[in-house]
Amino acid sequence: MCSAKASPKFKQLRQSYGFDEVAIVPGDVTLNPDQTNTEFRIGDFTFSIPFLTSAMDSVVDVKLAIQINKMGGLGVLNMDGIQARYENPDEVLDKIAKASDSEVTALMQKIYKEPIKENLVGDRVRAIKKAGAVCAISLIPANTKRLAPIVAEAGGDILVVQSTVTSARHISKSYRGLVFSEISKQIKMPVVVGNCVSYTACLELMQTGIAGVFVGVGPGAACTSREVLGIGVPQITATIDCAAARDEYFKESGKYIPIITDGGLRKGGDVCKAFAAGTDAVMIGSPFAQTKEAPGRGYHWGMSHPHPALPRGTRIKVGTNTTLEKLLFGPTSLTHGSENLVGALRTAMGFCGAGTIREMHKAEMVIAPSIVTEGKSYQMTQRV
């Protein structure tokens, strides 16, 4: 009699979860929403609301960066894009908005071939600082060594270094890559880097001395990296794993390095779930692109869209249907959670009895794949 042979194992997959597959369990104690504290810190800078704009040309320009900072959040200006390539970026943004779907990618590939002008980098930083706002500038790793000193000299406050995937150990034959431990010592400002989605990558990034980590690969509305490259981890799982790395690093070093969930956040419920999963702040793109103040003229596109050989983003029409004030603070008459994101966060914190963001991290969560549809047959029918 032959004994059954066990199937050989090559890879074991674990379940991972996105925003629509989980829910927050209310706490045993509740709290008035107006008694919650939503402060968020990067280095020595404190923000009253934990909301950052995605560093995308369609989302933020100098004017919006100034305005959101006055409201308590942080605008992150992209210095690898149109703002640093053209003296008058509004003219270029108009061309992108007016282009047809069939021609827009080729047009943007041409537009983004224009060299970055170092004088414009300094000009944009000084314009934000002149208005009294905190200035956060985003660079890709390849341009950081050259442009970060210009940002610092012009008075920049926070340096953001972002790429589709970021690790502390980049291997290259052609050049000595960006070493985060070195740039953190050389540049006298907090350095926030990303993006990553795993415990190990997040922990190793924190060990380089940086001031914060962005979490998320490919969840953004305008990003197609998951389709083109097949990479990414759903945001709830990615946030939980990186939050574990943050807490481990805090135990090791006594330094609390915030994580920022970046991408895939559409409505208030997504925002609240991100904080329950462990994030310290959220970076949002397409909802900000929908505001009247956004530079994208009702359109939104990923920064990998104009890649000369392998575009990994797409221009999407998001429309112009709200304002920065209504998006963040309301008042709103909409019932689906796309406005008053700060109010949604405060209310959820109150239901969980969480007085601070770090207390919100302790909220219980459950796997709930029917959370969006359960009992909502009439709503689902009316949305069709």
Image (cartoon, helix red, strand yellow):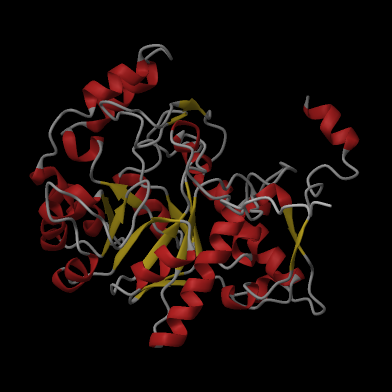
Residue drawn at point x = 54 percent, y = 65 percent: 241
Instruction: Residue 269 in the image: state x and y as whole percent.
Output: 68, 53
Instruction: Residue 214 in the image: state x and y as whole percent.
Output: 42, 58
Can you say whether 159 is above or below 46 in the image?
above
Residue drawn at point x = 38 percent, y = 86 percent: 253
Q: Is residue 265 something that shows in the picture?
A: yes
- Label count reads 0
Can you say whether 100 is above or below 309 in the image?
above
Taking 163 as reference, is 384 left or right? Answer: right
Taking 75 as reference, is 172 left or right? Answer: left
| Front residue of this view, candidates 155 and 286 | 286
For the view shown, which residue lies furthest in the front direction?
1
Instruction: Residue 228 in the image: state x and y as whole percent.
Output: 44, 31
Residue drawn at point x = 13 percent, y = 70 percent: 186
| Front residue of this view, candidates 6 and 218 | 6
Taking 173 as reference, is 299 left or right? Answer: right
Taking 120 as reference, is 282 left or right? Answer: right
Q: Is residue 39 something that shows in the picture?
A: no
Instruction: Residue 89 in the image: state x and y as whole percent.
Output: 24, 32
Q: Quadrant of residue 299?
A: top left
Can you say whether 23 is above or below 376 in the image?
below
| Front residue of this view, candidates 216 and 136 | 216
* Quadrant showing the C terminus: top right
Residue drawn at point x = 40 percent, y = 35 percent: 302
Can you say whether 289 is above or below 364 in the image?
above
| Front residue of this view, candidates 167 and 370 | 167
